[in-house]
Image (tube, rainbow, N blue to C red):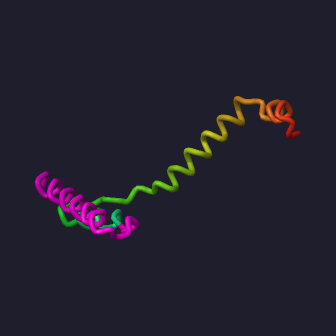
Amino acid sequence: MILAIVLSVLLVAALWGAAILFGLSLWIPIAGSVIAVLAWAGLEDATAFDYKGARKVGIDRMADAVEAHLNVKALLSLLGKT
């Protein structure tokens, strides 16, 4: 099982390297390929990670923390943007 996972990761890395080497678009749907290879290797519950969604959630959490702990109105008035 571990050997199959290692081989599948090496295969995906080789495909990614070939894409970079030959100037192919880097927006190849690699996540789907990785999931397919891992499913072939025996991993049954492989799911893609939503980087854009996680980034948005992180930015929203940071904005909420700034609003909760910083007096935004006072800061804007100091900057002259009331």
- Nearest the viewer among 5 and 46 is 5
Apparent side of residue 18 relative to residue 27 in the rendered image (left or right): left
- Residue at coordinates 60% horizontally, 41% vertically from top-left? 61
Q: Give the image quarter of residue 77.
A: top right
- Residue at coordinates 17% horizontally, 62% vertically from top-left? 41
Apparent side of residue 81 relative to residue 5 in the rendered image (left or right): right
Q: Give the image quarter of residue 32.
A: bottom left
What is the tally of numbered marks visible in this picture? 0
Q: Position of residue 73 (x, y in %)?
A: 83, 34
Quadrant of the drawing holding the N terminus: bottom left
Apparent side of residue 58 relative to residue 76 in the rendered image (left or right): left
Quadrant of the drawing holding the C terminus: top right
- Residue at coordinates 20% horizontally, 66% vertically from top-left? 40
- Nearest the viewer among 64 and 21 is 21
Q: Specify start and end residues of the magenta stretch as a single range.
A: 1-29
Q: Position of residue 47 (x, y in %)?
A: 36, 59
Q: Is residue 7 magenta?
A: yes
Q: Is residue 54 above or below residue 11?
A: above
Q: Position of residue 57 (x, y in %)?
A: 56, 48
Q: Is residue 76 magenta?
A: no
Q: Main secondary structure of the magenta part?
A: helix
